[in-house]
Image (cartoon, grey):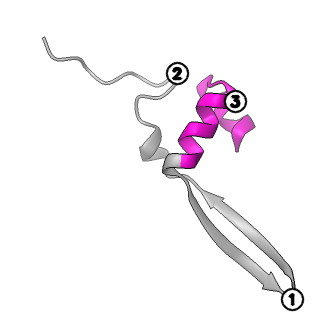
Amino acid sequence: MIQWLAQDYGLTTSEASLILGAAAEYRVATLAGRNAGMALGLAKTRLAGVGGLQPPATPR
């Protein structure tokens, strides 16, 4: 996910980590004994105005 944000949105590792820490949704996808599989989701709507996307308009 960090690589995807870096490649598609031109973010640094630190910037991508901040977004994932604040806006991503983590779920336990699999639970078997002592092992757990995690799933990470991030709605693209939360990336509006980030990186290479069109920045939000500034008021005049």
Q: Residue furthest bottom?
A: 33
Q: Which residue is found at the position 84% from the left and 86% from the top?
A: 32
Q: Residue at x 40, y 22 (%)?
A: 54
Q: Quadrant of residue 26?
A: bottom right
Is 19 inside the magenta-drawn segment? yes
The tag earlier along the polypeptide, 3 or 1, is 3
Magenta-colored span: 1-21
Q: Is residue 14 left or right of residue 52?
A: right
Which residue is label 1 attached to? 33
Q: Name the residue beneath numbered marker 2.
A: 52
Task: Judge the density around disc 2: few (<14), some (14-19), many (≥20) Cα neighbours within 10 Å.
Answer: few
Q: Amino acid at mark 2?
A: Gly
Cα distance between the residues tagged 3 and 1? 33 Å
Marks 2/1: CA distance? 43 Å
- Magenta residues: mostly which secondary structure? helix
Q: Report helix, strand or loop for mark 1.
A: loop
Q: Residue at x 41, y 35 (%)?
A: 48
Residue type indicated by callout 3: Thr
Secondary element type, mark 2: loop
- Mark with earlier residue (2, 1): 1
The residue to which callout 3 is attached is 13
Which one is in front in this view, the residue at disc 2 or the one at disc 1? Answer: 1
Residue 37 in the magenta stretch? The answer is: no
